[in-house]
Amino acid sequence: MENLIIALLPRERYSVAVRYTATLIIVGIATLLRLSLSEELQHYPVLLFIPAVFLSALLFDRGSGFFATIVSALIAIYLFIEPAGSFGLYIREFVPLSIFVGIGFAISAVMEALRRAIDKLSRAEAQKSLLLEELGHRTKNDLFMVSSVLKLQARAQKDPRIRSALEAAVARVAVIARAQERLRGDKDGGTVELAGYLEDLCHTLGDMLRNVRPIAVVVNSERVEVSSSDAVSIGLIVNELVTNAFKYAFPQDRGGTVKVMLSRHTRGLELVVEDDGVGCPPEPSQGMGSRLVRLLAAQMQGDLRRDAAHGGCKTIVSLPIERLA
């Protein structure tokens, strides 16, 4: 109902002639309906005029609602209230008609207040979206600058361990930057649509990690929006799991496929990263990436488990987060 009322609100203000002509048409339609139901509504002469007043005030303004109320009252007096065919009015009919006029004026005033409140909220929402977009743009630029500095530091390093650590840091910063890039305004704050985000992230990871090896990265994600902080955490988990698959699942230039799947389930979301490589290592890795995955899953109150029953290695992360859409 709320969305319907907002959808009916006009995007521009019409001229006085248009507003009042349209109001007369709406009241005229209500009159025709009342005439067609004269027998059924003989004791309710003004009932069908209340929706006409409401619609006029909703579509146009308070003045149109007042105008619809007055015209409706005059038509009711002339056609539907005894003595019919004149503007005379018995005393007993005066109070009900006065109540109708009061209700019509009240509806018009309330609709005008509602219109102003919605206009104010719309302007505030537009301003918030603009500020959020600007913040995301600035944050993204800052993160890319940090990433560029880390890349330069990595290239200058002779020690392969330090270079590898810096390159991993570059990838993690890029995950956060991509989340900021896909940030969108929402009534509850910034949200990120995960299907496109993960597709972009995994495509970039594949290009960066595969070198000349025939390894494909396949993403299959349901369209779902989550908060920006949850999107960053999920992106970091995917980044580490896909990177580990490239590092350990396909030794000696072996080819294969890494699948990333995200779906809804009863407790929230389920993330699966699966490869068809040499299988899971007998003991979980104690490297920084693996520790980061476990830490992020625990931070989100999620559950992480591995499955090597069908060859390759499958990591399943259940995340009980609130879905926004």
Image (cartoon, helix red, strand yellow):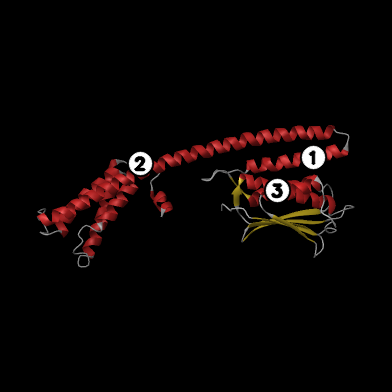
Q: Secondary structure at mark 2?
A: loop
Q: Position of residue 55 (x, y in %)?
A: 32, 52
Q: Secondary structure at mark 1?
A: helix
Q: Which residue type carries mark 2?
A: Arg
Report the mark closest to the observer, 1 or 3. 3
The answer to which of 190 and 207 lies nearer the viewer is 190
Q: Secondary structure at mark 3?
A: helix
Above or below residue 181? Residue 103 is below
- Residue found at x 84% / y 37%: 162
Q: CA distance from mark 3 to mark 2?
A: 51 Å
Pointer 3 residue: 296
Q: Position of residue 188 (x, y in %)?
A: 53, 46
Q: CA distance from mark 1 to mark 3?
A: 20 Å
Q: CA distance from mark 1 to mark 2?
A: 57 Å
Pointer 1 residue: 167
Q: Which residue type carries mark 1?
A: Glu
- Residue found at x 69% / y 47%: 235
- Residue found at x 88% / y 53%: 251
Residue 125 visible in the snapshot = yes
Q: Which residue type carries mark 3?
A: Leu
Structural crowding at the residue carrying mark 1, measured as other residues with C-alpha within 10 Å and reported as few (<14), some (14–19) or many (≥20): some
The answer to which of 11 and 325 lies nearer the viewer is 325
